[in-house]
Amino acid sequence: MVNHLTLAVAGSRKTQGLVEHCASLPHERRVLVLTYTQANQEELISRLKQHAGNHHYIEVMGWFTFLLRHFARPFLPFKFAGQRVLGFNFDGRPHRMAKGIGRFLDSNGAAYGCELGRLAHELVAESKGALLRRLECIYDEILIDEVQDLSAHDWEIIDVLLHSSIDIRMVGDIRQSVLATNPRSSKNAKYSYAGAIKWARERQSKGLLEILESVATWRCHPDVAEFSDSIFDPSWRFPETKSKNETVTEHDGVFLVSTKHVTEYVRLFQPQCLRHSVSSGKAFDLDYLNFKVSKGMTYERVLIVPTAPIAKFIASGTYLEASSASSFYVAVTRARQSVAIVLDKAGTSSLPFWMPAVVTAERMGLED
Amino acid sequence: MATGISRKASSQTVQKQTFDNHAGIVDNPNRAAGLIDMHPARSKEHSASPEKGAMEEDGVIRKIKIQGYRIHKNLTVEPNRKFNLIVGANESGKSTLMEAVALALTGRINGRSVSEELNPHWFNTTVVEEFIKKRASGVPVSFPEILIELSFEDLPELQSLCGAINSHVPTAACPGVTMRVSANPEYATELEEWAKSPTSLLPVEYYRCDWRSFADKELTTRPKVLATAVINSHTVRTSSGIDYHLRQILGDQLEPAERAQISLEYRRVKASMSETALNAVNTRMSSVHATLHSRPIALAMDQSARTSWEGVVTPHVDDLPFSMSGQGQQSAIKISLAMSRHAGRAKFVMIEEPENHLTHTSLVTLLSRIESLAGEQQQLFVTTHSSFVLNRLGLDALLLMGNDVAAKLSILDPETVNYFKRLPGYDTLRIVLANKIVLVEGPSDEIVFERIFQDTYGKRPMQCGIDVLSMRGLSLARGLELCAALNKPITALRDNDGVDPAEHRGLADAWLKKGERELFIGEVAHGKTLEPQLIHHSGETLLRDILGIAAHADLLKWMSREKTEAALRISSASKKIVPPAYMLEAVKFAHG
């Protein structure tokens, strides 16, 4: 058994690990590196050119391209005789009542991104082994980065690959799986988002997969790392994050900031401000980035405008549901040194409130 | 890599192959014995299942489908794994078949890309006529298309070409490539405008060429696994000394490292020219201000890609440049290069009419070389008009071009294949190509048969499309077997040699078929051979008259001694003989 899943924490240099693994492989090994986002794909290609440029059989591909090129395009006729995939439709969705080929391809013959995983998975069986045999002959090893981003039918495909002769190596941080390949699909709901950990542990118990845990973060300050761990229900059994960030500044850790001090805080520390979506954080005129968009980024400091459930979690310790926890985790772990959360009622939270120096002085004066 | 391993394995098994020892193979009994062992497997392989086939490394094109390309309106061929000898009458599309296969394998034709070479004459004229007729009568049929589809063996190294985007019904996945030439929808308006007053020359400017794998991936350059060598008899007389095909073959011959080394060294040599011989000239010229802006002018060796080593490096034979050697020698060299065993050698070798430009002796040598070089992992396509080539390379490799199908000899006894191999001078191609064939034992039978036919129908057999062929001492049974394998109607005649005709028929029974393939033998009572049969039926008086034999001479003795002379006299006589009953029957049967 040579299939591996490395569960890493944010800032643990996952991608670099993949690149180093590629560089360590025999030169003639035919390797496919898969990833979900375009940005990550480019990042991987450029890093591989740097560190494994002498490996000529390493190919980097997006997940959808993989499904199109090796599943849908060659084998579509097994499901729909005489038909071809003529393109890719990333944004479109089939009509809810769509039947037959209309469920998978639009009127121009372009495959719907959200249904591609399902189509690809069904073709594996329909091709009576031809699809998998083809893949086994083309690649010796498939590496999948950002594996937490896959969902629903994609996991079925991973399952197929785990049973193939191809060595599968996956890297991901399932704590930050905020992207879903098909938001509408209910299939594999139990595996999606942070629940994916259960999926992996089931495979491990069957001997299909070896789970390696990489818990060291090079990014987050120990206090930030510790707080990021506290976001998840302990029953999910995530290991504790170890911080290797030893930098000390005048403002390190996780703080609460009351609404009246937000402007002053931003002026002083110039954090990257994060919000859940366009509709949140309207109370402040800040230069926001949405949680999802911030994925993969690193900032010295962040300021988070919490959603109601996040505020509730901080004030009362009520755990967030999986997807909310993931997106909050992404936001928190963007920061190297400090995280500030805008909140007026701290409830039972032990997080300290940040106070402007003047206010502190005034208060001290009053107390005197 | 899987391919690397299999190559290693195969090079070990073929070590015994040599380049020099290609002569004398025909007469070498050990060699012949080796061939016998080789062949029984071959005919069985035709029906082998794909799963079984996948284990074997030789021969990868399993199916060729050509639609609307030149003479081929709709042709499907399932070639043999190793050797394919394509025979057929003139204009039956042998060369077109080879051309189409090369087109789909390489995406090029005569060294140029398909879209560059595309012209209206590529389209099947019948298809175009139908299109014009239908459009004229108001039926909005679509524009004619060309489709060339090659399905390969399901080999591991070909899997990147594997998929179900092919014409197989029911849906099936296998490696393959498709070349499709079809109307380009981007020019829909122009096309329809043209269709208002169509001509037989299609507007290929509005067409597009789409070259794809069965995995529906567009191909731009020839996949390395589909290495193809095309050897035609066109003489090499290009300015660079080698033609495109030879360059391709040479290119495949060299390892990448060797190529790089040659290229670097050539560049270095050129550079040194600039520093030595040209230096003096440049010193002198530097004082001449000849250019418009008085910039110094100097001579240097051209180092641009246009002048790469490939343009000047050419094979030499006995110190003569390749292009200066004879045409026969040129083909021989090309064949040897394409078929020799090296890592990057061609998987497909296509040879057009190897018999051209060669003396009989050279042809023997060349065929032996082809045979000894042909090995695992190579599929050979040879067109020929020569029975010698056909017999020598093995009748079981025959692909007979017919209308829309290429017939194969699937059930020929390996012994028979060998029989003709050892007697390659025999005109088997005549049997193969004839519509109706009459097989007789010797020249005298042939001549007498023709005369009786003429007497009966007032025409020569050839005028009725009947080819009369003498076996000249070769086994009639082998000829019968060949015809049976080709499913050809045949009239066979033989002497009874004192044996009951029923017994002869019994021996040949497997090849005979009532009404199609029949064997005619004279009654034992009427004489053992043709001559006593003739005497029995015509009577001595008539025969003596026709033959001009004096009364005192022994007629039977003379006829038996001067068989051919007797036959010729019968043939040219003004009087008719009374034909032997079995011959007349045979004449009537052959005429039908």
Image: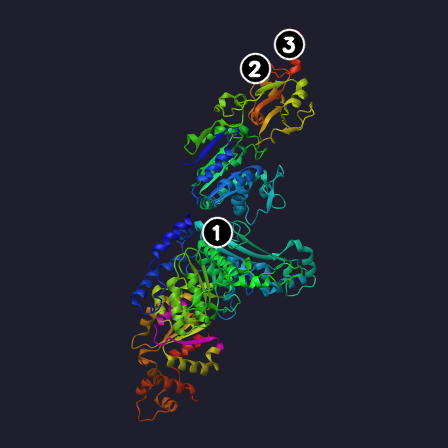
Q: Which residues are magenta?
A: B463-484
Kind of residue at disc 3:
Met
Q: Nearer the viewer, residue A246 or B429?
A: A246
| Chain for disc number 3 | A
Q: Are the numbered discs 1 and 2 placed on the same chain, yes or no? A: no
Instruction: In the rendered structure, find residue B354 and report the number of the disc placed on it.
Output: none
* Left or right relative to A286: residue A168: left
Question: Is residue B306 within the magenta segment?
Answer: no
Q: Is residue A202 visible?
A: yes
Instruction: Evaluate whether label 3 is on the same chain as label 2.
Output: yes
Number of the label disc, if any, that sits on residue A364: 3
Task: For mark 2, give the secondary structure.
Answer: loop
Spot occupied by residue B493 in the image (x, y as percentages of width and height): 37, 75
Q: Are marks 1 and 3 on the same chain?
A: no
The residue positioned farthest toward the top in the image shown: A368
Mark-to-mark CA distance, 1 and 3: 81 Å
In front: label 1 or label 2:
2
Residue nearer the viewer, A252 or A132: A252
Asked whether residue B426 appears in the rendered view, the answer is no
Gap in angstroms between the C-alphas marked 1 and 2: 65 Å
What is the quadrant of residue A283 in the picture?
top right
- Circle 1 residue: B175
Residue with the mark numbered 2: A350
Q: Chain of mark 2?
A: A
Amino acid, disc 2: Ser
